[in-house]
Amino acid sequence: MDRQRTEKNDERSARERPTLKTLAFMTGLGVTTVSRALKDAPEIGAETRRRVQLVAKQIGYRPNRAGVRLRTGKTNVISLVLNTEQEIMSFVSDIIYGVSEVIADTPYHLIVTPYSRSQDPLDPIRYLVETGSADGIIISRTQPNDARARYMLEHGIPFATHGRTEMGLVHPYHDFDNHAFAVEAVRRLAGKGRRKLALLTPPVGLTYHGHTVNGFADALSEVGASEIPFSTVSIDHSIEQIRTRTAQLMRRENRPDGIVSSAAAATLALVAGIEDAGLKLGRDVDIVSKQSSDLLHLFRPELLIVNENFRLAGSELARAVLGWIGGAAPGLLQSLSVPGEVLAYRR
Amino acid sequence: MDRQRTEKNDERSARERPTLKTLAFMTGLGVTTVSRALKDAPEIGAETRRRVQLVAKQIGYRPNRAGVRLRTGKTNVISLVLNTEQEIMSFVSDIIYGVSEVIADTPYHLIVTPYSRSQDPLDPIRYLVETGSADGIIISRTQPNDARARYMLEHGIPFATHGRTEMGLVHPYHDFDNHAFAVEAVRRLAGKGRRKLALLTPPVGLTYHGHTVNGFADALSEVGASEIPFSTVSIDHSIEQIRTRTAQLMRRENRPDGIVSSAAAATLALVAGIEDAGLKLGRDVDIVSKQSSDLLHLFRPELLIVNENFRLAGSELARAVLGWIGGAAPGLLQSLSVPGEVLAYRR
DNA sequence: TCAATATACTGAAACGTTACAGATTGCCAA
DNA sequence: TTGGCAATCTGTAACGTTTCAGTATATTGA
């Protein structure tokens, strides 16, 4: 029998990934010492610490995630929970990129946990919590009374919501100020002399639906304009539905001369519907629309545009979860992005 | 001292997550037996097997991922490697959703591994392989001579590429038939009497750039049309750049009367540039454009459209990686999606 | 001088899983 | 009866990490 490779002392054949044992062998220390030296524990001599860290860097030591996770329960994972059917367009990629930017310099990985319309939105959350698959969770499509947020609070897992809740419970969030958006939008339409305004709302049931509707109403009375109800569709409806309903609306006697749209894709349908009805954007009616990528002005230069930065949202959400995981007070991890790219922190 | 909670035999207080030890205690078997019973090992009695599986289901046993991963090296993770800066719009979310659909019924998680333009695209791949963070990898922006694909083949990690390589190496891929797309596009333009055609290409350097260019050239000679060179921009360029260049192009004496566009966002810029030059879509020039979400027809009804389904691509890619992980031959995990939603498998 | 204490380090155990190398039982052929 | 063998089941070790409970040595105070 030739040269037994499996000798008890570590002759890791250089190709193997180094572990604490490897480092211990190389430095002549115990694995405990190495472990503590790497995380700057106080009871390790200054020189030993430096020596260990040097060697670790030299041979490119990377802690084994499974080992850490098994021992400590820490996953170093942030989960982004997404609805596979209702999330809109580029929204998702921007959020992901935003989150990525923030966790790039951390040991965290981003896992995407999808769920479909047919499922209870709580399902994926329960899964994550029960299996301990993540240290932190990011959710979107937040509702005023959100079962997921409540559940996560009860189970003590750090999370951040895209959008606010209204349960009197404190948790990190990032939100776009849709009230301000609606106010701004109405003012701009009023500035163009528009007096009969309609609102294409966010999905009913989500918190920002309320924010938008309230902002719209507040601004209407401020500028003395009146509302033309348009509640048969929301931006969650299909392009075709929005287009048809818009055409119907615009053919009525009492049609709006200004519309506020909460999403870019929906705006395309709005305009199509308007033109189906034989009307002209900018002449017969003006539209203020939110957009997240800078394309709408190419579609129709007459469109009035407000930008919402989802990449920023992703970054803020990631920062918030990481902050909570790191022990910060959840109440201080809440941010609001107002139209015009200014970011306001609470307090 | 009262009732010691930490008795050696498992009195897991019902709130704890069940482990093999819990199951072993409940069934009166050894943990080895339980482990094997759960994975239908042959040397376990039929009744025992059923009994164990029943109990496991009842108490909702879920194997601890960290335990499995530490012991076996299996991560149950698929990594989707994305460029955070160049990937376009809804592209990403569709792919993610496609992948999600496929892995939903498996124990796999999807992690998104981003890299930025400044980095070597090989970096994230190296990281994944060196740290053993994933069982399989999906990459996009595939090049004819792709260092990443070569690296992954050398290191024996299963992967699938979105787009083909041309290295004479066999690996799973999914691709849209951009040659066919370009041919189809030219034919449609020719059918409208267009004879001087330009091509807004995919990013130079990516494999499908070549496919598109070749298809374009082949079809040109087939229909007897001529090419107006337009190689100063690609769909990777900014909207503004494409718009400006297009306007310049369209103001020339020898301007195209038909354009083929490889991406929807770029098409918006194309049209803007055309109109900047005082020309009219459908009258002075026709455009055939790819799109991945069904919105372009709202932008300009005159646009001629070919659909590319990225969600399908995501699903196919996931199926391919899982197939390879499962031991299938990589050469049989290659699929091509042709314009018109028909999906062709190799052979 | 002795004990007390601080400093720097260490081995063993544990997290949950699977692989290896048995152990126990019953049955059958010789 | 015995040996052999198949059918089932089991204990132990190991994956890489951190924590617990130390140990050894030097330093201090009286």
Image: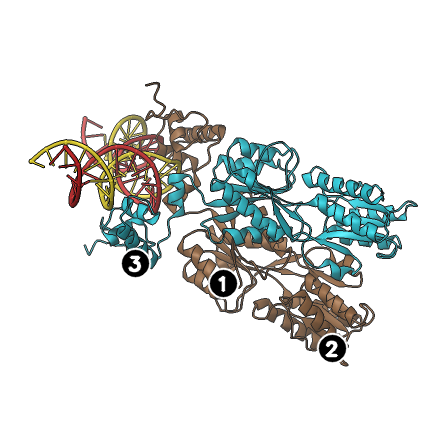
Chain colours: A brown, B cyan, C red, D yellow
Residue A200 position in % (x across, y down): 67, 70
Give the residue type that dot 2 points to: Ala
Q: CA distance from mark 1 to mark 3?
A: 26 Å
| Quarter of the image where the C terminus of chain B is located | top right
Residue A7 position in % (x across, y down): 33, 24
Q: Residue at x 62, y 47 (%)?
A: B344
Labels 2 and 1: the sequence-earlier one: 1
Q: CA distance from mark 2 to mark 3?
A: 61 Å
> Callout 2: residue from which chain?
A
Mark 2 Cα-neighbour bin, 10 Å: few <14, some 14–19, many ≥20: some
> Which SS class for mark 1?
loop
Give the residue type that dot 3 points to: Ala
> Callout 3: residue from which chain?
B
> Which SS class for mark 3?
loop
| Quarter of the image where the N terminus of chain B is located | bottom left
Give the residue type that dot 1 points to: Pro
Of the numbered discs in the image, which one, if any, rests on residue A121?
1
Say if residue A99 shows up in the picture.
no
> Callout 1: residue from which chain?
A
Q: Residue at x 56, y 70 (%)?
A: A205
Residue B321 position in % (x across, y down): 53, 43
Q: Nearer the viewer, mark 2 or mark 1?
A: 1
For disc 2, the marked residue is A225
Say if residue A206 shows up in the picture.
yes
For disc 3, the marked residue is B14
Q: Which is nearer the eye, C8 or B307?
A: B307
Q: Residue furthest right?
A: B253
Mark 1 Cα-neighbour bin, 10 Å: few <14, some 14–19, many ≥20: many
Say above or below: B85 vs A292.
above
> Which SS class for mark 2?
loop
Say above or below: B69 vs A136.
above
